Image (cartoon, helix red, strand yellow):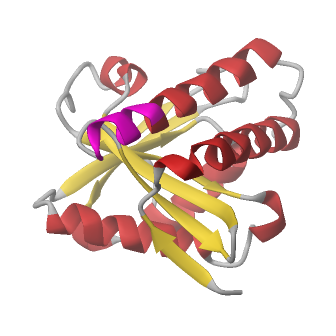
Amino acid sequence: MNLVIRRPRVKDVNQLKELFRLVITDTFHKEGIGHLLEDMKDEIETKNNYLNRDIESGGKDRYFLIAQDGDQIIGTIEYGPASELINQCTNHAWKGMNEVGTVFVHPNYQKRGIGNQLLESMNAALKNRGIKEFCLDSGYRNAQKIWQKKFGEPDYLLKDYWGEGAHHMIWRIKVREV
């Protein structure tokens, strides 16, 4: 694999939007919630909007990094202002904090360390911008296991937030810890 991590360009937008659709659809099915078509559509649209905000602002409103193998974009990560969900669930205690999200890896490339490489690259980008901490959240069980292994127990555990047994977790992470 010839992995390159870089900023997206305008010509990458269509391929990135296809990656969002693919990874979100795959994730919903693996999580057993593939029937929630409207939620899936909303999640895809949110990621598309984040990407548009990055491209239009030159990385000021949202900031993406992409992982590319040859000509194929196989992963993404981004940061921007904490979501309204995080603000509500933390009683606005973290308002103004940056959130790292959209940590997506193409299903055919998962479990190869690409997500870790994206996270390390984002850590460097945050550090270069003088950002000392960020938050990260997940309602997906599989992602929660990864984040718990990497960052420990969440700062906020919202039991049954998405339904019985479907929790939401939010972490506050110091940049140097990554």
Name the residue: 46% across, 54% down.
9
Q: Residue furthest bottom?
A: 1
Q: Is residue 138 above or below residue 163?
A: below
Q: Is residue 100 visible?
A: yes
Q: Could you say where residue 26 lies in the image, as x and y percent from the top left?
A: 83, 43
**Secondary structure mostly seen in the magenta stretch:** helix
Q: Could you say where residue 57 lies in the image, as x and y percent from the top left?
A: 28, 37
Instruction: Write down the region rendered in magenta.
Output: 52-58
**Left or right placement of residue 173 versus residue 154 in this view:** left
Name the residue: 71% across, 20% down.
41
**Left or right placement of residue 160 versus residue 108 in this view:** left
140 falls in the magenta region: no
Quadrant location of the C terminus? bottom left
Name the residue: 28% across, 72% down.
124
Q: Is residue 143 above or below residue 40?
A: below
Query: Which residue is nearer to you in this view: 92 or 121?
Result: 121
Q: Is residue 102 visible?
A: no
54 falls in the magenta region: yes
- Which of the 4 image quadrants contains residue 164? top right
Q: Could you say where residue 176 lies in the image, as x and y percent from the top left?
A: 24, 72
**Left or right placement of residue 98 versus residue 136 in this view:** left
Name the residue: 49% across, 72% down.
5
Quadrant location of the N terminus? bottom right
Q: Could you say where residue 51 lies in the image, as x and y percent from the top left?
A: 47, 38
Query: Which residue is nearer to you in this view: 95 or 8?
Result: 8
